[in-house]
Amino acid sequence: MDRLVLAEYQGRHDAEGKAVGHAPKVLGEYAALTAGDFDIRILAPRCILKATSEAGRQNAKVLPHSILMKSDNSFFQKIWNKIRMFSNIKIALKSDSDTVWFFNTEFYLMLYLALFGNGNKRIVCTLFMEKFGTGFLGKIKQKIFEIAQTNMSLIISAGKSFTFKNVPYVFIPDYYCDETEYAPCRRGARLRQAVCLGTQGSEKQIEELVDRFTQIGYPLIIAGRFYDKERLEKLKAAAGENITIRDEYLSREEYLKLMGESAYVVLPYAPTQYNTQTSGVLQEALFCDTVPVSYSDVLNGNGIDGIGFEKWEDLKSDGNSLYTASDDILDIQEARKDYARLRKEVYSRDAMKAKLCEALSLKPSC
């Protein structure tokens, strides 16, 4: 049986030590999908291992470094964080395995591979974006990314339409739809409210979101950890009475409860970034039959129907529902039929396992 190392080199966590982001979830899922077909070894910082499933803790070794997420890192703290990630990557590449799978990636892994190579390992990378920025700096980062690709054996692309120049790639979503977890979210009555869930970082257009929902008066709950507390207070001061802002780390149960009981989930992502980047929240909206609301480019880039707009001012409410132009009102029942088709054909556990087995060249038992 071939040995496969699943490596999570970032270890992002908040001030209380709780893991931030989707690394614990995908680690558990990938470990469960490949168990029995590979001799799995897991490398991850302690905060990630504490937050993942039992499958994600089997045969695990703790990587020494993790990253504290906060808004006021100094220049030297930022550099030190990059060095710590480099150290974790180096340890992973020295592991006793021919294949190392980096399943939660960002630019500094690409920089490491471009500068130092692959350590004579077969490198597999899951990528949630097609390119690393635009403009002059973006072009430099993209060139580094393309050099890094020459040191990879395979890209697992979380985006269906992504293409890469210098390495074979295959589309496999980063989440699968576990019916035991998500089916209950589709059974209850929907509340007349929208939610905005997940880490509330600087990349989200939360000011625009709060401004628009204050104007249209539709109930909105923003729930997730804010690193920038000054920004949080300004948002609370600007928010109308129809908006609730909760600065907290949501448990899995509370996250799914909010997703499942709400009519809409709003994704305030910049379209220039997320038309070529995937979103875990958007995938879980699909799993829960919750209608996503975002820029049209974000929805189209991820191939998921929802309420799309070109600018925030296009988003309107009649008191009960959200919509954009009156001649382009989403047929929610038809949209949910498409969500069901995608859950079965693209996001099911069996479909993802079969594609992973083929992509990773597992045994015929797959």
Image (cartoon, rainbow, N blue to C red):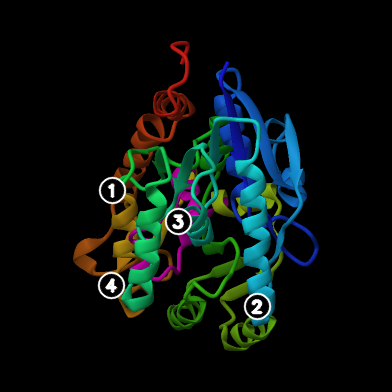
Q: Which residue is disc 2 drawn over?
A: 71
The answer to whether one can see residue 265 in this image is yes
Give the distance between the C-alpha atoms of the residues marked 3 and 4, in whole angstroms: 37 Å
Judged from the image, the secondary structure of the residue bearing numbered disc 4 is: loop
Q: Residue 310, labelled with which disc?
A: 4
Give the mark toward the camera: 3 or 4: 3
Badge 1 local density, few (<14 within 10 Å), some, or many (20+)?
few
Asked if the residue at tag 2 contacts the one at tag 4, i.e. Cβ–Cβ closer than 8 Å, the answer is: no
Decide which of 103, 231 is in the foreground and name it.
103
Give the distance between the C-alpha atoms of the residues marked 1 and 2, in whole angstroms: 33 Å
Q: Which residue is disc 3 drawn over?
A: 114
Give the mark toward the camera: 1 or 3: 3
- Magenta residue check for 266: yes
* N-term-proximal mark, 4 vs 2: 2
Residue type indicated by callout 3: Ala
Residue type indicated by callout 1: Ser
